[in-house]
Image (cartoon, helix red, strand yellow):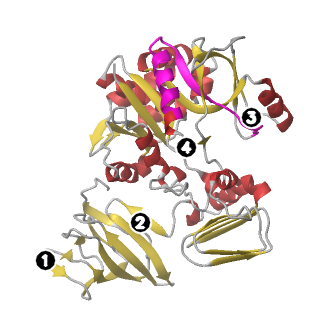
Amino acid sequence: MLIIPVVLSGGSGTRLWPLSRKQYPKQLLNLAGGAYTMLQETVVRVGHLTNPIIVCNEDHRFKVAEQCHSIGNTPSAIILEPVGRNTAPAIALAALEAQKQDPDAIVAIFPADHIIDDQNAFEAALNCAIATAKENKLVTFGIVADKPETGYGYLKVSLPEHPGNGLMAHPVEKFVEKPDLETARRYIDSGDYYWNSGMFVFKASVYLDALKKANPEIVNCCVEALDKAQQDLDFVRVDQASFAACPDDSIDYAVMERAENVVAVALDAGWNDVGSWSSLWEIAHKDEQNNALVGDVIAINSRNNLVHNTHKLVSIIGLENVVIVDTPDALLVADKNQIQDVKLVVKELKKRNRPELMEHREVHRPWGCYDLIGEGSRYQVKRITVKPGASLSLQMHYHRTEHWVVVSGTAIVQIGETQQVVSENQSVFIPIAKKHRLQNPGKLPLELIEVQSGSYLGEDDIVRFEDQFGRC
């Protein structure tokens, strides 16, 4: 019986704007200060099991694959969601995929954006959950709460009058929505409520049977979407029309709150879902004045602040309970007690169709990245980095010329039908409407400066003829 971890990486992490963007959400970032991003931490955490199934947004596919490969992990499948349909369908896709590997597979479901400090405690709880799942139970993890928290849902469990030693799974009586502070205090004082973690373990077949009873349309749509799926490089590209027709529902509403075989295993392992800047401040290393400072920061007569920046000196004087997050293209300054209202900023960015909602100034592509370092009405200047062995698409532009200056490395540049080698301190010019391609043949990153000039400089002025990454 295979135990297959499933990593859900479909979130957008808007409450951590401006660091988290829709095209580069929080699970792809290193927020905890360790060696890995949150997605990588999750994959490493379950590395003692088999290779994971990852369910992710189609727009994030290359970043997810790259981050897994960079830590030496090859997922057994990366399932692409063409549209978001919440956790119940996402887990159904993973369960159906897991049954292809083993009809009796147990799937262990973990969001990609959680932090867990105590690996030993996590593995002990996971082993208990796996043993319980073999008994055809739907297992969730209840986080042992150390304080009343209004930002989480809760589980009420039936505890025995004389609990024994060691971890055990206990029946879940009910799932409770996020409470007010007084209600949260009562929950904590009672001792029989846990925080709802959003992590689960069960047989794929048991979950799918429960989902069929509660909402058979979800299962039917997911079966059809996978039956019509196409394999694309490392990815399982499910059928868009079939999946778009799927009802939008969470696993809690669709299954866990309705099923009778739901149990919870207590987890006390330093868990945090890093759902806001204030929660990140809570887990961060702090100085003597309780400031969490990331980057080049000078703090004078300031207490209980979070300052996060990576590209220039930030100085604060006489501040208390303030969040400051500075990125190359956006600055957030907020009272820590009102930081949840960053969602209102995100809403306004969406209303105004601002690019800061979607991507950072440094934009990642499957071949590398580019950073917009200067622009005017008829020009843009970009710093481009191409990974070893990677190639940009064969493309052309109708409205702009491009001038490339190689800073480090060696490039092979195709213009029309002619190829040439361009080395450090050399340059090349690409006229309007001329097919061209840039390739890095070396073993080190290729860096160059690109100067664009023309009447229109948008990214949609790209006509692709060939692309190793299957983009059109």
Within 10 Å of disc 4 (Cα), the crowding (few <14, some 14-19, many 20+) is few
Cα gap from disc 2 to disc 1, whole angstroms: 25 Å
Which callout, 3 or 2, points at the residue further toward the start of the chain?
3
Marking on residue 178: 3
How far apart are labels 4 and 2 at the CA level? Answer: 43 Å
Residue extending furthest toward the right: 182
Secondary structure state at the residue bearing disc 4: loop
Q: Position of residue 44 (x, y in %)?
A: 41, 43
CA separation in Å, label 3 and label 2: 43 Å
Q: Residue at x 28, y 55 (%)?
A: 469
Q: For the magenta stretch, what is the residue range?
A: 121-150
Q: Which residue is mark 1?
A: 418
Query: Residue 272 is drawn in which quadrant?
Result: top right
Q: CA distance from mark 1 to mark 4?
A: 55 Å
Q: Amino acid at mark 2?
A: Asp
127 in the magenta segment: yes
Is residue 334 or residue 435 the one in the foreground?
334
Q: Residue furthest front?
A: 165
